[in-house]
Amino acid sequence: MSHRSNRFVRAVLAAAIVGAATSASAQTEIQWWHSMTGALNDRVNEFAKGFNESQKDYKVVPVYKGAYPESMAAAIAAFRAGNAPHILQVFEVGTATMMGAKGAILPVQQVMVEAGEKFDQKAYIPSVAGYYTTSKGQMLSFPFNSSTPVFYYNKDVFEKAGIDTSRAPATWPEVMAAAARIKTSGASQCAYTTGWPSWVHVENFSAWHNVPIATKENGMAGLDTVFQINTPLHVKHWSNLAEWSKKGYFSYAGRRNEAEAKFYSGECAMLTSSSAAQANINRNAKFKYGVAFMPYYADVAGAPQNSIIGGASLWTMAGKPKNDYKGVARFFTYLANPARQAEWHQRTGYLPITPAAYEITKSAGFYDKNPGTDVSVRQMLNKPPTANSKGLRFGSFVQIRDMFEEEFENMLAGKQDAKKALDNSVARGNEMLRRFQRTARE
Amino acid sequence: MEKRVIFRSWWLPYLLVAPQLAITIVFFFLPAGQAVWQSLLNQDPFGINVEFVGLDNFAMLMRDEHYLASFRVTAVFSVLVASFGLVISLILAVFADRALRGAGVYKMLLIWPYAVAHAVAAVLWLFLFNPTLGIVAHWIKGLGIAWDPLLDGTDAMILVVVAAVWNQISYNFLFFLAGLQSIPKSLIEAAAIDGAGPGRRFVTIVFPLLSPTTFFLLVVNIVYAFFNTFAIIDAATGGGPGQATEILVYKVYKDGFKALDLGSSAAQSVILMAIVIALTVVQFRYVERKVQY
């Protein structure tokens, strides 16, 4: 398998380079493995450069290690071999795995306190901080890039189809009425599409309607959690999607963010996907578009609630010399600076993860100049989070998400109905949760 | 008559095979042994909590209907890849073997795809078959056939089979061509004089004389379809839609490297190893009898 051996060669090379570099300089090197590409990668490098120039004792070395699952697998392999990086960027579905790895990671709170750096957990937006905090209130990782799904619509196509563009469709029935008009008028080839099917149509769908994804506060209060996504509301939504797919209102685009390209190319007129897609849409779309809250079902009491985050956080890996962690802590302090957070938010489309960053951005008039950029924040803060909407924490969630999406695809292909797809998702997901529960101890 | 070399010292033959043995042990037996050991454990990704579970991982796989479905997918995929790969390249080789003007160019063009990395080949075909952008998808739709490899499992299977076959044809072609060129011309000419047409000559002389090559390629292609196609699957479909293109080796990769479930992944690779060993034994014991060297 050339793939695997390639990775091995790269790892050896990287290790050799790292080894050579450490011995050559007096500074302490802080390895930071991340998964940011393109413009985001440039921003990560700027953070490291800025920090390195601001002091002399430490040098942060950012290394792109592939997509989220790859960098996580690489770091785990490195940990097993005894040379893990200091800082690892882990996507939100890997959170439970990292939390279960006592001994492999150091809680960010502990790192900061031991290094004598100021760290205020309350400086973070609760639904962001809560995602990375144990049930006992200890914050384990440093929030870095968070996003949430929002609704995008192509105003040019709406006008062509004769739909009012002053107000976005707010509910799913409204979205589908618009889709029907777009389809019959032929204003665009495809009416509605979505990125990240499980994240949008299971996880955030549940939070947005204030219903649980699973027992035990979506897994945040215990490992003995059980999925609850086969309720009549979930079944109704999935069977609607299946029906809309059959009618040609909804075009399935894939399990990741493939749908975003379908939107900014003008092929699809409506999209639900990450708020972090906005930078890309802005650059590529040759039409007027609007950003709005995710649609909901108006007959559900309490909807819309608030949405939950995706994205990634920075984990500190254990097993390094004590002095190294001082550097890690100082770097986190550097990153936590509100002005830097605000700039990161404005330039990337990721959420401002501290209220301070939001205020700075707001008072600078950024939201007025760039309409739609505050939708994600307002959606996150729409209501104080409940047990159903503060986040989720499931072991083996990479696999489980794949299972949900497999069942979703089989439903759209007409092999099974929504009830069966969701029942299967629950059964298969629960089996993975039990398996995870056996190895991870709190 | 058998040729024998007599070594004067008892250690020299061992010394001479030692490098090869060392490589086999380090790169095959040790990892395989490790896989067998890990298949008996359930552990968290970091290897902090390790629990000996005996055959639990295997039991769980045997209960999992989705894992069992993956066997069917693998069988369909391998049979399609091996048979199309062999038949098409044999036809191409037979044609390229004739004295033609510019035969060298044809041969070079036919060998070319082998230089393309699997993942690149997959992306290439993915583009050609993309329902909105792809030219091939456009033609298919022009014929009035619905085409959607994102949701239709059969379409997705066609896509990965085409990419895998295309990538492997060159290799098969080279061996078939070499095999064809080593067939004595006198035999074919004698048959021609006796009045056998090209078709009959192929069936009674060429194909039987090619059988060692065909047998070798059959083994190689099955192993290729089982193991080396995972880059194609990963880049083209990611195993989807549903699990329509999730072959066993892809599931090993996905569960092990993406989902970090080492116990299950190791158990799957042990099963896969057993299957390939069994298949190769069957091929050597039964199919090889029909081979005329």
Image (cartoon, rainbow, N blue to C red):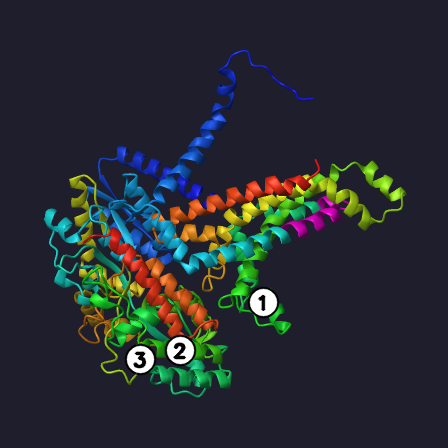
Total marks shown come to: 3
Closer-to-camera residue (B34/A316): B34
Asked if the residue at tag 2 contacts the one at tag 3, i.e. Cβ–Cβ closer than 8 Å, the answer is: no
Q: Chain of mark 1?
A: B
Q: Which region of the structure is painted magenta?
A: B85-106
* Viewport quadrant of the C terminus of chain A: bottom left
Q: Which mark is residue A296?
A: 3
Task: Name which residue type carries label 2.
Answer: Ser
B181 over A262 or under it: above or below: above
Q: Would residue B103 be counted in the magenta stretch? A: yes
Q: Which residue bears the numbered disc 1? A: B137
Closer-to-camera residue (A166/A78): A78
A339 over A420 or under it: above or below: above
Task: Name which residue type carries label 1.
Answer: Ala
Q: Chain of mark 3?
A: A
Query: Residue A157, percent across and down?
Result: 45, 81
Q: Which residue bears the numbered disc 2? A: A239
